[in-house]
Image (cartoon, rainbow, N blue to C red):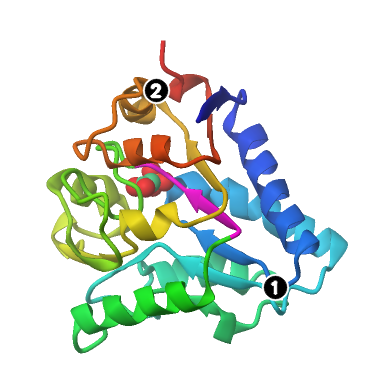
Amino acid sequence: MKITNIGDKKQASFYVATELYKQMIHKKESKLGLATGGTMIEMYEALVSLLEKNQPDVSQVETFNLDEYIGLDAEHPASYHQYMNNILFDQYKGFDSAKCHLPNGVADNPEVEANRYEALLDEKGPMDLQILGIGQNGHIGFNEPGTAFDSVTHRVDLTDSTIEANSRYFDDKADVPKQAISMGLRSIMKAKRIILLAFGEHKKEAITQLASGNITTDVPATILHLHPNVEVYVDDAAMPD
Ligand code: PGA
């Protein structure tokens, strides 16, 4: 694993957007593992600019998001369905919505939905490129500290730290869902190539733990040391001392 301080958020976002773009051009039926969150906003904006400028055919690209809140339907403004539509799928019109997948947060039975999503990943995968953010507690996807390294897509109880961090997207902290459906750590590790992005002082501790090389379920992102093809890009503020 290489941890690179690529300078600032703008440069890192452009770099990762370019890697996603190149992947889509290189292989028309690319499988992309996508992430949401504040970290990714500039990256998707840069990707949309590249797509608009070059107008590639992305109708065969298939995307798989990491997670969705339980209880939020696709129209809810804080759902990850809405996030993805607003930031990418409604911006560049070439994606086939039938090929853009997220777990269904309002499925009758979240366990059945998690199993369905994992089966879909198995059928369509592996991801050619998986993009990840990281939580302040070291989570990837919504795999909170203590999650088994062999976990597959599952129902997750969100930690207070995650609920607090994500409350900025809701009117009230009490509105933040307490559970989500997330790809598991084993699901994520199946990707051929993984890029993790982290920006800001508040991510420095998690990146410092990652950089230590210690592999522990207490910091779920440390599983990435067991993957052969992982790049981590950070800004000055998130770079360990
Ligand atoms: P953020 O979330 O990009 O909003 O900081 C990242 C994460 O929790 O994985």
Using the image, tell me which numbered label, if any, was put on residue 211.
Answer: 2
Mark sitting earlier along the chain (2/1): 1
Indicate yes or no whether the magenta region holds residue 149.
Answer: no
Residue found 52% across the figure and 40% down from its top:
228
Left or right position of 81 against 157 = right
- Residue numbers of the magenta segment: 128-134
Residue found 44% across the figure and 73% down from its top:
122
Residue 26: % across, % down:
79, 60
The single residue placed furthest to the top in the displayed view is 241
Which quadrant does the C terminus fall into?
Answer: top left
Q: Quick one: SS at disc 2?
A: helix
Residue beneath label 1, please? 29
Which amino acid is tagged 1? Glu
The single residue placed furthest to the bottom in the displayed view is 108
- Examine the image and state in which quarter residue 182 appears: bottom left
Using the image, tell me which numbered label, if any, was put on residue 153.
Answer: none
Note whether 175 is above or below 212 in the view shown. below
Residue 18: % across, % down:
72, 48
Local packing at callout 2 (Cα closer than 10 Å; few below 14, some 14-19, many 20+) is some
Check contact, mark 2 vs mark 1: CB within 8 A.
no
Note whether 34 is above or below 18 in the view shown. below
Residue 210: % across, % down:
36, 28
Left or right position of 178 against 204 = left
Residue found 34% across the figure and 80% down from its top:
104
